[in-house]
Amino acid sequence: MSKAKTFFQCQACGYMSPKWLGKCPDCGAWNSFAEEKKEISSRYSSVVAHIGKSEPKPLSSVKHETGKRIITGINELDRVLGGGIVSGSVILIGGDPGIGKSTLLIQALSRISKKHGIVLYVSGEESPEQIKIRADRLSINSDNIILHAETSLESILHSAVNLRPKVMVIDSIQTIYTEEIMSAPGSVSQVRECAAKLMLFAKKSDLPVFIVGHVTKEGAIAGPRVLEHIVDTVLYFEGDSGHSYRILRAVKNRFGSVNEIGIFEMSDSGLLEVENPSELFLLERPVNASGSTVVATTEGTRTLMVEIQSLVTQTTFGMPRRTTIGVDFNRVNLLIAVLEKKVGMHLGGMDVFVNVVGGLKIIEPSVDLGIITTIASSFKNIPVNPGLFVFGEVGLSGEIRAVAQAENRLKEASKIGFKTAVIPYGNYQKIRGDFGLQISGVKNVQECIEIIFS
Ligand code: TYD
Ligand code: MG
């Protein structure tokens, strides 16, 4: 016997209430409640139940199985995952529609199937014919890639048990439903329940599962935040429609670092790995223009050379405008104040615009010195030497602080042909060798401006 029960649930955070509410008391979202039905079933979850039980055991008796990662062969993806796919892990990939999630996954599956055998691609959004059109475009064809257009979780798990694939992809979690809950696919309780079941299944059967998640207008993966807590790894696939490159970023990873990014370029024949992102980001750098500086920034284990641009113009209205794209707004305001007070640059009557070229977002403090230099360059209308780059954190009294991974930054810059570096004195003292660069160590902002613009 089972009895149906209805309740109302916030579609943003998963808060439950017996009555409809206009505003969620938990997350504060307005008009986010929807009616959900939950069937309280006495039937024990069938498929998952007989995959095997686990027993409590001492830590010392647990084997460390490092060799159990599946290498996809797409380096950018492997690195973001922390060195390949851990068996039994559940990986959520979020991103705007049309960004290339399905493309990335079918390309990864194709590589995996060549080395490891059968893989399963479950699509609740596209028919096998539509998937075939994409595969043809990517020149992918294989007997080992099994397509399954299905939305019932129970049937999906059933075919996974029968086929024993090496990797399974669920495209997307919002289209899947479990028969145990009456709510519509895509609702909070369905998404959460399906993800939890997939997680249990993945762990018990040692099968890695990729889950595609849609992103809402606000940029969060649709469905409750709990989805991010359930899974092992959360990746975001970003990029804007105006540019052809895409960035894969780990925001949570139980098996690796979250600082890693992977860079791809969307071409006519699918996603290509970008091995030298610095060259890509510096490709269209203006020659001898003021307000452009290159900084060496790090993302995880890799160094990127990125151009920071600025434009400083006379304010036409009373209040000066400050606009930033890709760097923190408050940070830029703080650095403008440092320039004003410590270097005597009168920016109070000036509009200041700062932009990171290529749509990157930099949160690392080493970009400070780049922002200082680019604003000073535009203010003075003097171009920065194109072979020069900077990095360093700037403090409130104008002092320049050392940053991590100085040698990696110098190496990367030297590799792509930079000649001169202006870096924190604290780093300058410690580096071994000059990496073929002419390096100046600076202690404060005044010194930096003097060296660059004299
Ligand atoms: P898709 O992987 O379907 O995106 P998602 O699953 O994230 O919604 O990618 C669709 C977009 O990518 C579409 O706008 C077309 C473009 N694309 C290419 O430019 N080249 C290609 O080879 C492929 C397969 C897609
Ligand atoms: Mg898709």
Image (cartoon, rainbow, N blue to C red):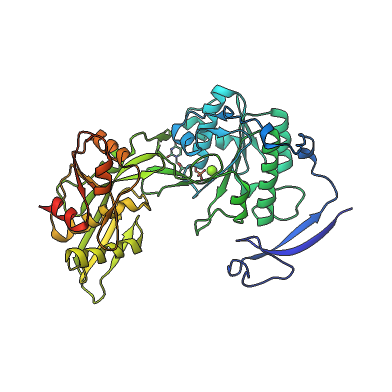
Which residue appears farthest toward the bottom when viewing the image?
Answer: 318
Question: Visible in this render: residue 195?
Answer: yes
Q: Whole-percent x and y of residue 66?
A: 57, 30
Depth check: give the residue in front, 244 or 256: 256
Q: Whole-percent x and y of residue 334?
A: 30, 64
Quarter location, residue 313: bottom left
Depth check: give the residue in front, 57 or 414: 57
Quarter location, residue 379: bottom left
Q: Is residue 255 left or right of residue 162?
A: left
Depth check: give the residue in front, 21 or 58: 58
Give me the residue at 72% from left, 32% from top: 161
Quarter location, residue 18: bottom right
Q: Is residue 433 above or below residue 254?
A: above
Tally the numbered discs: 0
Give me the residue at 26% from left, 38% from top: 413
Q: Whole-percent x and y of residue 235?
A: 51, 45
Q: Quadrant of ligand 2?
A: top right
Q: Is residue 95 left or right of residue 348?
A: right
Depth check: give the residue in front, 342 or 356: 342
Question: Visible in this render: residue 383?
Answer: no
Q: Is residue 266 left or right of residue 312?
A: right
